[in-house]
Amino acid sequence: MQFFIHYFLHLIFPLFIAWLFYRQQYIRVWGIFLLTMLVDIDHLLATPIFDPNRCSIGFHPLHSYIAIGFYLVMLVPAKSRVVAIGLLMHMGTDLLDCYIGTHY
């Protein structure tokens, strides 16, 4: 069940947010939200690359608390806001995984 919740929050929930707040261009915004999942490239630096018992938040460089602080700052300028929202939704989803158990 956690697998479905995780990917629902990564794929479908961002579509709903894009449609709710950026209705005129929701497909474009959803595409940007999906592109922010590239932040997971930092998983390639870990050994093993995937560990279902590892919390991404605070472990991977782009999932660090410093990076999350930077994503919060990115909310301020309008030009980076959509990317920041996508990154923060991603971090929220990964944080939820840390509290509800293993990934899958």
Image (spheres, grey):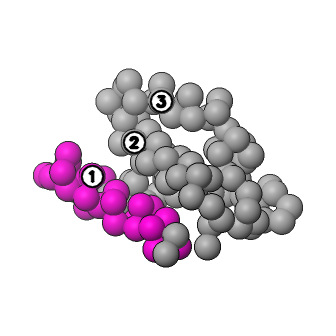
Q: In this view, does 103 lie to the left or right of 81?
A: right
Q: Mark 2 points at which residue?
A: 85
Q: Magenta span covers which residues?
A: 3-29
Query: What residue appears at the point 53 percent right and 52 percent down from the top-left corner?
Result: 96
In the displayed structure, would residue 41 be above or below residue 63?
below
Query: What residue appears at the point 49 percent right and 47 percent down from the top-left corner?
Result: 92
Find out whether the residues at labels 2 and 1 contact each other: C-beta distance under 8 Å.
yes
Q: Name the residue under label 3.
A: 72
Pointer 3 local density, CA inside 10 Å: few below 14, some 14–19, many at least 20: some
Q: Is residue 66 left or right of residue 15?
A: right
Image quarter in which the C terminus is found: bottom right
Q: What residue type is labelled 3?
A: Leu
Residue 23 position in % (x across, y down): 15, 52
Q: Which amino acid does label 1 sit on?
A: Ile
Name which of mark 3 and mark 2 comes first in the sequence: 3
Q: Name the residue under label 1.
A: 17
Name which of mark 2 and mark 1 comes first in the sequence: 1
Tell me if residue 63 can be seen. yes
Q: Is mark 3 on a helix, strand or loop?
A: helix
Q: Is mark 1 on a helix, strand or loop?
A: helix
